[in-house]
Image (cartoon, rainbow, N blue to C red):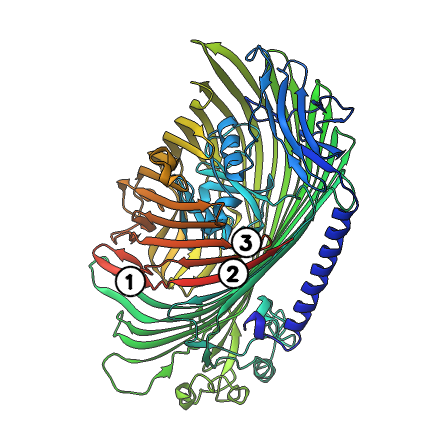
């Protein structure tokens, strides 16, 4: 259901709310501008070498009594400055005094002057700043990257604005060395999603995926992000459970002054929008991606259906309460739509000590995907082959509320909250043949609704105790939920080559994919506390801290299916099997000599799991002169104690299963940063990290995935992997927003965890998780951002950026009774190369920006074969996007984007045969933004 046609009242309420917010914002703005004829000077004071904020710097205007001191964030504000031209002086002990002439203040306006102070040991004279400090956020992110103590890459809100990217996963594929799988999982430097970790505002995020050790990055709307930084080398103050990258999503912060923004967008998808689209009768809140209970298991069905001593007649009465929602309906897919609204303030409403930002974002999407599914025996013969379509309605909405309060200039408290909700409502139809046994022609149908939500809350403090100590602490809580109510599957079949009528493939026992109804629910909560202490000394800076984190997961599921020839119910009238899909499961067909229901008895269907991590770290930062240049040594170690547990039951649900994996890991780290000049660094890093099994991967639970036609099972014998990481990087930041870098990396992985395919299961192909004996990953990264004005003055408004990653890996797997030994194959998910390129145009005179973007990844193994079959490999595809932004007025702007212009299909092959195909389509969108 489209947001704008969901109900008769929703649009009017939305319009009234927007009008009210606009009126309030306008009144506040008018009042603020009218209350004074003076201006304000504000900015940030940082260390030129490290980029760290300087606390307590003196900022004053020459010839006046006006001035201020920088606070705990390095920010300063000089208010009530009469209009005029001033010289500003910034000073701090052990730093060279800096003078900034020609600071022009206008009545009712803000003037921003950011200052980088140089240490007196480096600068012996006063520094005079003659031009305005750069305010480009992309340049600020690059400056942070240049001064970081670890190797990192990132993407800013400014870059995201120049792309059609709607989610954080869309944006992350633009970053060097990163590729995206299933539009939500990231692979960093050739390692799969399980080798990366996710933080939101420096706090861990809970996972909403039942079978992945990864955060699904499609959960976070990109317009709620200020920037995303990916640490590729480890330092002891970061979690040690990563080998590819540590992704830190940072949400938008409150602005310097009162700001209001409203964006409304609509998009047209080729082959879907305004075309026939299949769905079914759902709930009233489907436009929000929330099930209103329409898909819930009826309360009349007891929790002990599989164990209770119920008569056949009682079971038939239970069955009659199941909703007959198996029929489809066809309608025209409307245009996709969405909006974002935000309000923030730093000084206007409640004074300079308090800041806040609030935002709400929503988008929906109708998408039709053509599917092809094939699987082959080790002999090369076809096991099954299907063609069909999937109709998916998706929603993504979320919001944030961040509050901050400063206690004097040396203490700050923050309360940050982010919530996101996404859903997929699918109708899938496949037609084809199953060639095993005597062979059958089949029609498969599936109805699936999945909703995921994540909340992240953080209460934190920053404290500055003079030059002796800086302390930071944070108390965080992350909650994720995944609800999959009433996943329904059924197969109609007939003998291969016959003209007989299709009959429903039902049996005397409940089956995962034949007339089954699957209900599952996942709840995961992560709570923790962390503290960091910085002790600046003359020769060395010390940092130490600790963390305690407690993660708990509850997973429950039930499979209830329609069966024939139920005990005590007589032989089924087989004429019922030939009824069409919209009538076969009518309540009246659950009767004596008709259908009955049964619950699949399996104790592993439910499990509770937990993970407790306690950590302590110590690190130092020591800088000295070597061969006439500054050399910074950053070293230390982190001690992590982890305990993972899984509680479940055996297959017969008679005995308890308890799985425990406990480890103590000492994780050393060494980073060297050699400053070749003011703009260039040479970095060397060596460290050791770990990769623990995800709780689901340890749980002995089997689950059928209709999309891939395979089942997934955990492995209680998994061990944690140990990874040794080595990096060498050259980087040069030679202009505002310009840089080049080249990196070499090597990873030595012991007991690497991979997802593999096991054949011969009663359910067909089965995916599980195993430790490889040894794996190596090594490669090269190149990145560049350049203004073409360096080539010709006529190209001064054009910029190019690009990155290229070359990766190789080698995995060694010893053979077992059921698997063959393999040496030298690539790591699962590793692409041999990743390419990103962008050409952009930016004109302040015309208020116009435009970008042409290109992305391509090399072929990669999606599923590893363990026997004599071939691996399943995803083929490369070229993705081209185009975006143009135009400012219509000071407050109004327009954005047009064309996404995936080529619309090439996503193809998977097994050997020289095509195993899967998912069609892809291009989309164009237009959005209009109003800001105040």
Where is residue 837 drawn, in percent x and y? Answer: 35, 44
**628, above or below 268, in the image:** above
User: How busy is the neighbourhood of tag 2: few (under 14 within 10 Å), some, or many (20 plus)?
Assistant: some
Q: Quadrant of residue 789?
A: top left
Sequence-wise first label, 2 or 1: 1
Question: Is 226 above or below relative to 280?
Answer: above
Q: Residue furthest front?
A: 84
From the viewer's perspective, tell me whether residue 627 is left or right of residue 4: left
Report the residue marked by disc 3: 221
User: How far across and how far down the image is residue 41, in percent?
Assistant: 69, 33
Mark 2 in CB contact with mark 3 (< 8 angstroms): no
Name the spot of residue 919 as percent of width and height, x first.
34, 64
Mark 2 or mark 3: whose residue is earlier in sequence: 3
Residue 445 location (% of width, % of height): 41, 75
Question: Element under label 2?
Answer: strand
Mark 2, residue position:
927
Q: Residue at x 57, y 23 (%)?
A: 129
Which numbered marker is on residue 287? none
Circles 2 and 1 in contact, beta carbons < 8 Å: no
Q: Quadrant of residue 750?
A: top left
Residue under the image location 31 percent in, 40 percent down:
814
Marks 3/1: CA–CA distance: 36 Å
Q: How many marks?
A: 3
Q: CA distance from mark 2 to mark 3?
A: 15 Å
Report the residue at 36% width, 84% height from top. 503
> What's the CA distance linking mark 2 and mark 1?
43 Å
Element at badge 3? Answer: loop
User: Relative to residue 93, is residue 768 depicted above or below?
Assistant: below
Secondary element type, mark 1: strand
Would you say 402 lies left or right of 236 here? right
Q: Which residue is mark 1?
A: 375
């Amino acid at each position: 259901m489209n947001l704008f046609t969901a109900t008769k009242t929703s649009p009017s309420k939305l319009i009234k709310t927007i009008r009210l917010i606009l009126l309030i914002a306008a009144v506040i703005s008018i009042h603020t501008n009218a209350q004074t004829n003076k201006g304000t000077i504000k900015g940030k004071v940082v260390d030129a070498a490290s980029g760290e904020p300087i606390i307590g710097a003196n900022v004053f205007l020459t010839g006046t009594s006006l001035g201020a001191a920088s606070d705990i964030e390095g920010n300063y504000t000089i208010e009530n400055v009469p209009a005029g031209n001033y010289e500003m002086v910034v000073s701090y002990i052990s730093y060279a005094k800096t003078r900034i002439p020609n600071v022009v203040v206008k009545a009712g306006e803000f003037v921003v002057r950011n200052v980088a102070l140089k240490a007196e040991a480096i600068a012996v004279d006063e520094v005079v700043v003659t031009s305005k400090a750069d305010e480009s956020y992309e340049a600020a992110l690059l400056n942070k990257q240049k001064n970081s103590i670890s190797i990192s890459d990132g993407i800013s809100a400014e870059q995201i604005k120049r792309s059609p990217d709607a989610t954080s996963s869309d944006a992350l594929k633009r970053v060097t060395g990163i590729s995206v799988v299933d539009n939500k999982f990231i692979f960093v430097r050739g390692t799969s999603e399980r080798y990366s970790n996710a933080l939101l505002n420096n706090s861990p995020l809970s996972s909403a995926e039942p079978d992945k050790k990864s955060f699904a990055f499609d959960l976070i709307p990109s317009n709620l992000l200020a920037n995303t930084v990916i640490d590729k080398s480890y330092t002891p103050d970061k979690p040690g459970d990563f080998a590819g990258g540590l992704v830190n999503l940072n949400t938008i912060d409150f602005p310097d002054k009162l700001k209001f923004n409203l964006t409304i967008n609509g998009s047209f998808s080729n082959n879907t929008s305004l075309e026939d689209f299949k769905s079914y009768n759902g709930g009233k809140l489907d436009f929000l991606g929330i099930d209103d209970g329409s898909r819930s298991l009826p309360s009349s069905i007891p929790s002990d259906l599989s164990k209770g001593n119920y008569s056949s007649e009682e079971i038939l009465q239970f069955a009659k309460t199941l909703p007959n929602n198996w029929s489809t309906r066809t309608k025209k897919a409307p245009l996709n739509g969405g909006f974002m609204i935000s309000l923030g303030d730093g000084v206007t409403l409640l004074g300079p000590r308090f800041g806040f930002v609030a935002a709400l974002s929503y988008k929906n999407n109708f998408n039709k995907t053509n599917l092809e599914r094939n699987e082959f025996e080790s002999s090369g013969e076809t096991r099954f082959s299907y063609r069909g379509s999937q109709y998916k309605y998706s929603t993504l909405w979320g919001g944030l509320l961040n509050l901050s309060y400063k206690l004097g200039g040396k203490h700050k408290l923050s309360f940050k909250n982010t919530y996101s909700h996404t859903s997929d409502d699918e109708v899938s139809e496949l037609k084809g043949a199953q060639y095993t046994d005597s062979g059958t022609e089949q029609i498969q149908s599936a109805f699936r609704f999945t909703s995921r939500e994540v909340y992240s809350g953080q209460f934190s403090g920053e404290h500055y105790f003079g030059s002796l100590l800086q302390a930071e602490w944070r108390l965080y809580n992350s909650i994720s939920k995944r609800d999959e109510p009433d996943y329904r599957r059924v197969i109609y079949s007939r003998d291969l080559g016959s003209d007989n009528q299709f009959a429903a493939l039902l049996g005397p026992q409940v089956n995962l994919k034949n007339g089954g109804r699957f209900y599952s629910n996942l709840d995961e909560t992560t709570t923790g506390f962390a503290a960091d202490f910085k002790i600046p000394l003359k020769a060395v800076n010390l940092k130490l801290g600790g963390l305690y984190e407690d993660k708990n997961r509850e997973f429950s599921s039930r499979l209830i299916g329609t069966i024939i020839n139920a005990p005590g119910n007589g032989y089924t009238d087989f004429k019922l099997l030939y009824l069409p899909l919209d009538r076969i499961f009518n309540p009246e067909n659950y009767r004596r000599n008709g259908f009955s229901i049964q619950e699949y008895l399996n104790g592993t269907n439910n499990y509770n799991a937990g993970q407790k991590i306690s950590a302590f770290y110590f690190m130092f930062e020591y800088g000295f002169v070597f061969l006439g240049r500054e050399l910074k040594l950053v070293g230390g170690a982190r001690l992590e104690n982890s305990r993972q547990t899984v509680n479940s039951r055996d297959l017969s649900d008679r005995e308890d299963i308890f799985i425990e994996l406990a480890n103590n890991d000492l994780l050393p780290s060494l980073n060297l940063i050699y400053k070749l000049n003011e703009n260039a660094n040479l970095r060397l890093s060596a460290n050791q990290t770990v990769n623990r099994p995800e709780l689901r991967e340890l749980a002995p639970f089997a689950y059928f995935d209709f999309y891939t036609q395979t089942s997934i099972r955990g492995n209680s014998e998994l061990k944690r992997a140990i990874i040794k990481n080595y990096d060498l990087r050259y980087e040069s930041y030679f202009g505002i927003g310009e840089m080049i870098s080249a990196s070499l990396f090597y990873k030595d992985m012991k007991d690497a965890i991979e997802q593999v395919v096991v054949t011969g299961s009663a359910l067909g192909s089965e995916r599980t998780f195993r430790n490889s004996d040894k794996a190596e990953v090594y490669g090269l990264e190149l990145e560049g951002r350049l203004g073409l004005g360096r080539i010709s003055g006529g190209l001064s408004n054009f910029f190019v950026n690009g990155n290229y990653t070359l990766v190789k890996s080698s995995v060694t797997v010893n053979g077992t009774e059921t698997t063959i030994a393999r040496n030298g194959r690539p790591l699962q998910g590793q692409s041999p190369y990743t390419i990103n390129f962008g050409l952009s145009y930016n004109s302040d005179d015309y208020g116009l920006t435009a970008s042409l973007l290109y992305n391509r990844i090399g072929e990669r193994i999606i599923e590893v074969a363990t026997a004599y079959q071939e691996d399943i490999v995803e083929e490369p595809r070229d993705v081209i996007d185009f975006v143009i932004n135009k400012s219509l007025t000071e407050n109004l702007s327009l954005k047009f984007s064309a996404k995936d212009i080529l619309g090439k299909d996503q193809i998977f092959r097994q050997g020289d045969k095509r195993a899967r195909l998912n069609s892809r389509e291009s989309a164009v969108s237009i959005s209009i933004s109003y800001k105040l």
